[in-house]
Image (cartoon, rainbow, N blue to C red):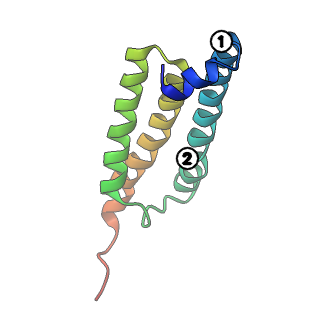
Amino acid sequence: MTAFSAALAAYVDPALLAGLRESVGLLAACLTTLSFVPQAWHTLRTRDVSGISLTMYSVFTAGVALWLLYGLLLGAWPVIVANVVTLALAATILTMKLRFGRSEAPPQR
């Protein structure tokens, strides 16, 4: 338990605090996961990957996979569900970048 949780526990019923913790985790998971839907949809629809960094999406996708593993090790379902969906979306975008990004001409200087 963190110091913040301990301080809250002194004023709030522990069952309510547990529900609040799960609700905050679920809301955070939904918002961060849903933020990838527009990019994935745009990429699938247009096949335009010119503005996507291969390095960033590779590192990000690996990080999401590790967050998923972390959630599995903790048994934290909001972390697990959010990262399963985010990993699917990020992997889709990364796959599109690998598939369609190769035909791009390098920038002219």
Identify the residue at the far bottom of this view. 109
Residue 73 is drawn in which quadrant? top left
The image quarter in which residue 62 lies? top left
86 horizontally vs 94: left or right: right
Report the residue marked by disc 1: 14
Give the x, y percent position of residue 19: 68, 17
Q: Say what amino acid the circle numbered 1 marks.
A: Pro
Measuring 59% from the left and 28% from the top, which residue is drawn there? 25
Q: According to the image, label 2 marks what residue?
A: 36
Q: Amino acid at mark 2?
A: Phe
Residue drawn at x 45%, y 43% as measured from the top left: 90
Q: Secondary structure at mark 2?
A: loop
Residue 22 horizontal/vertical position (percent):
62, 21
Gap between marks 1 and 2 measured at Cα: 34 Å
Q: Going from the N terminus, do you reach mark 1 or mark 2 first?
A: 1
Q: Residues within 10 Å of mark 2 (few under 14, many from 20)?
A: some
As rendered, which of 45 and 25 lies closer to the eye? 25
Question: Quick check: 7 above or below 91?
Answer: above
Residue at x 58%, y 54% (from the top left corner): 45
19 relative to 39 in the view: left or right: right
Residue 65 x, y percent position in the rendering: 36, 32
> Is residue 23 rendered to the left or right of residue 84?
right
Q: Nearer the viewer, residue 15 or 42?
A: 15
Marks 1, 2: nearer the viewer: 1
Residue extending furthest toward the top? 15
Q: Residues within 10 Å of mark 1 (few under 14, many from 20)?
A: some
